[in-house]
Structure formats: structure tokens, C-alpha cells
Image (spheres, rainbow, N blue to C red):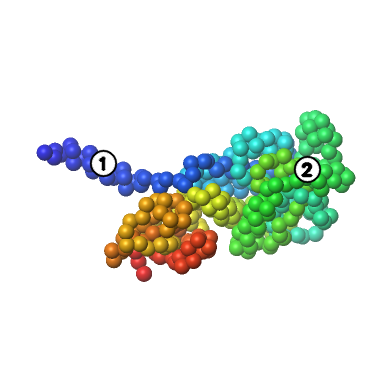
């Protein structure tokens, strides 16, 4: 007999289920660790503008970026080299990334020039600077070690202000160069999308990247020495946009990483362009990519699914229709479809609203 108490229990279970839908299993159980490194801090202000300090901009954008990532991915661990205003040695930052066995390292900085008004963003990967300008940026950033104790011993006599010291970067093998450059390019694309001046992907000898043993980039968000850029980078809106641009690049990088691992990025919660939190999808159109249809239900290892994990399906007209990925952003779902094209050349985008397919 069903009692009122049973009914209450079942109701509570249903409510809980609606509130906390079961997470789809993640293709591989490995946690992806991203280390976010807000440059400078504490006694080292970094570049100083008319009203703002580099260290504060770097920290604000880093924390926003970390929150966006943590809110969207269940399988990503975010580690900060600092989450408040404190001084951290450059080699300690790299060590932290290595100790955490990080999969990606993002160092965040703000640029400045002594003369003139320069605008725009640059993303660096480790390498030998091919221009005076890139060398100057590395010199400026590396000079942070002059505030460290025992920097002569720690960095084996490296003089951040002498161009001769930088010869060590010429012979450095960087096995993560390709991935670093690809991530750096995505970051620059993200900045272009929010109308920043694109100063490109560059190489220079940054000490903070030198000892990291994973793909790593150093982002220069803009020029604090240029009044309009300082104002933008100081504003909450500017910081949100900058963090969002890097976040978008991260989403693409992580998806590619998952694909290479043979897993999938079902862990990507719904990425909305305007909100760091996963958007509630009730009443909203959710896009998915349809990859395969079958007249019978397929096993998860069926050859038709080509090794993709976290594939979803719905039934329509007696056919099982399999989908991959989901997003409320048309741009994002298009990117997912493009990434699927070589395995499923006829894949196409479909839309759902409140769990039902819509035209
Ligand atoms: Zn800096």
C-alpha cells in the first residue's frame, strides 16, 4: 500500500533528481589541472599606470577566469599561484605548476611602454625573442626576480636586464611549443572577438615559463601606460571581457585535449557568452550536434560511434538519433560540429527546448 509517507519520499526524490541531474560520465577520469598565474603581487606592483597597478589587474582577471572555468567544468582543477595580493618568486610559480602536474599554465600580465601610446594584446610562448620589442617585454617581466632573495644563485647568474643572458633561450627544446602556440592563437582570437587590438602571438624568454613542464603561455592583457587601456582594464566590464576571451580559448583547448584523449567534453557545462555560471536551460534553446541515426539502440562501444564517449541520443520516428555536445551558443555548437567533421562528415546541428526537439 502506498502511504502518504511513501508518496512524500518519492516526491522528494523526484525533486532532488530535477534539481541535481546526474552528471554524464566523463570520458576519462583524469582531472585536468590548469594553473593560473597572476603576475607580480605584494611588494612587486608590476607595471604602474596613472591610477592602476598591474598586479591588481592581473589578479582580478585571473580570479574571474578561474571562476568561469570552475563553474563550467566538472573535471578541471583550477590552481592559482596567488589568489591575493602577495609576492611569489618566479621559479616558485613554475614549481607550483610542476608539483600539481598541471596540464596547462596561464600567466597573466599587463604591458607598459615608457613612451608613446600603444594599444593591444599579445600572447607569448617561450622562445628566443626575434625582435627588440619582444625582448624588452621579457626583460621587464623577468626583472621581478630582482626583488627575490638570492636571485643570483637561484637563477644561476641570469641578469634579466642584459640581452646576453637571453642566449639560453635559443637552445631550449620546448616539446610543448606546438600546443602552447595553438592555445596562444585561440586567446588572441578571443581578444579579437571583443574588439581588442591584436598584436599577435609572439615568442620571448620568460623565466616564469622556462621551467614549466606543460604547455604554457604568458598573456599581456593590454597597455597600462595608455590611458584608455588602463581605464578598460581597471573596469569590471573590461576585466570580465578579458577573462571571457581567455576562457573561450580554454574551452576550445580543452575540447581538443579531450578529443585527443579519445574522450569527450561532456564535462563542458553550458557555456554562455555573458554569464560565468552555467546557464539554466529551462525555456532556452539548447543546440546539439546529431552524428548518427540507427534503427536499433547502439552499444556505447559501437563502431558507428567511432570511439566517442558521452554520446547522447533521442528517439524520433522509430530511429535512435545520436548527438554529441550541447550548448546554448550557436558559435560554440558550430565549433563542436567543425571538430567532429572529420569523423562524422554529415553531422548537423539540432535544437531542443525543455527536452523536446524544436525546428
Ligand atoms: Zn608583468
Q: Is residue 296 left or right of residue 101?
A: left
Q: Residue at x 63, y 34 (%)?
A: 99
Q: Which residue is mark 2?
A: 142
Question: For residue 12, which numbered disc appears in the image?
Answer: 1
Give the side of residue 112 with respect to residue 350, left or right: right
The quadrant of the picture occupied by the C terminus is bottom left
**Where in the figure is residue 73, as x and y percent of width and height?**
49, 47
Q: Nearer the viewer, residue 26 or 122?
A: 26
For mark 2, does the 10 Å Cα neighbourhood hold few (<14), some (14 to 19), or many (20 or more) residues?
A: some
Q: Quadrant of the N terminus?
A: top left
Q: CA distance from mark 1 to mark 2?
A: 58 Å
SS class of the residue under badge 2? Answer: helix
Disc nearer the start of the sequence (1/2): 1
Q: Can residue 127 be spotted in the picture?
A: yes
- Name the residue rendered at 40%, 62% in the picture: 292
Q: Is mark 2 within 8 Å of ligand 1?
A: no
> Where's residue 255, x and y in %?
53, 53
Residue 313 found in image quarter: bottom left
Count the marks: 2
Where residue 118 sits in the image (x, y, percent)? Answer: 75, 60
Name the side, left or right, on which 209 lies relative to 250. right
* The one of 210 and 230 positioned closer to us in this rendering: 210
What's the residue at 74%, 55% (across, down)? Answer: 202
Report the residue at 85% width, 40% height from top: 159
Near-viewer residue (190 or 115) = 190
Report if residue 47 is visible in the image.
no
> Furthest residue to the left?
1
**Residue 71 x %, y %:** 49, 47
Label 1 sits on a secondary structure element that is: helix
Residue farthest along the bottom direction in this orientation: 359
Label 1 packing within 10 angstroms: few (<14), some (14-19), many (20+): few
Q: Is residue 2 left or right of residue 170?
A: left
Amino acid at each position: 500500500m502506498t502511504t502518504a509517507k511513501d508518496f512524500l519520499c518519492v516526491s522528494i526524490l523526484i525533486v532532488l533528481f530535477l534539481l541535481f541531474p546526474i552528471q554524464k560520465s566523463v570520458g576519462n577520469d583524469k582531472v585536468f589541472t590548469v594553473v593560473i598565474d597572476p603576475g607580480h603581487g605584494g611588494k612587486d606592483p608590476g607595471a604602474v599606470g596613472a591610477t592602476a597597478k598591474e598586479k591588481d589587474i592581473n589578479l582580478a582577471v585571473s580570479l574571474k577566469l578561474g571562476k568561469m572555468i570552475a563553474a563550467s567544468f566538472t573535471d578541471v582543477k583550477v590552481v592559482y599561484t596567488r589568489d591575493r595580493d602577495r609576492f611569489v618568486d618566479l621559479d616558485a610559480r613554475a614549481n607550483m605548476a610542476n608539483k600539481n602536474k598541471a596540464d596547462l599554465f596561464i600567466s597573466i600580465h599587463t604591458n607598459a611602454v615608457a613612451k608613446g601610446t600603444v594599444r593591444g594584446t599579445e600572447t607569448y610562448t617561450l622562445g628566443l625573442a626575434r625582435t627588440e620589442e619582444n625582448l624588452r617585454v621579457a626583460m621587464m617581466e623577468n626583472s621581478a626576480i630582482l626583488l627575490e632573495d638570492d636571485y643570483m644563485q637561484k637563477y644561476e647568474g641570469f641578469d634579466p636586464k642584459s640581452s646576453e643572458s637571453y642566449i639560453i633561450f635559443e637552445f631550449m627544446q620546448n616539446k610543448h611549443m606546438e600546443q602552447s602556440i595553438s592555445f596562444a592563437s585561440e586567446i588572441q582570437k578571443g581578444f579579437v572577438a571583443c574588439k581588442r587590438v591584436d598584436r599577435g602571438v609572439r615568442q620571448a624568454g620568460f623565466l616564469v615559463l622556462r621551467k614549466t613542464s606543460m604547455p604554457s603561455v604568458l598573456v599581456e592583457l593590454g597597455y597600462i601606460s595608455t590611458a584608455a587601456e588602463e581605464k578598460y582594464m581597471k573596469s569590471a566590464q573590461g576585466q570580465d571581457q578579458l577573462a571571457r576571451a581567455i576562457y573561450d580559448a580554454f574551452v576550445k583547448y580543452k575540447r581538443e585535449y579531450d578529443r585527443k584523449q579519445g574522450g569527450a567534453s561532456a564535462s563542458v557545462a553550458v557555456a554562455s557568452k555573458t554569464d560565468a555560471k552555467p546557464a539554466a536551460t529551462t525555456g532556452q534553446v539548447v543546440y546539439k550536434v546529431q552524428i548518427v541515426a540507427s534503427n536499433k539502440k547502439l552499444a556505447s562501444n559501437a563502431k558507428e560511434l567511432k570511439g566517442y564517449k558521452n554520446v547522447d541520443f533521442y528517439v524520433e520516428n522509430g530511429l535512435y538519433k545520436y548527438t554529441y555536445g550541447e550548448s546554448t551558443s550557436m558559435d560554440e555548437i558550430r565549433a563542436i560540429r567543425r571538430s567532429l567533421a572529420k569523423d562524422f562528415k554529415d553531422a548537423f546541428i539540432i535544437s531542443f527546448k525543455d527536452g523536446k526537439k524544436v525546428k
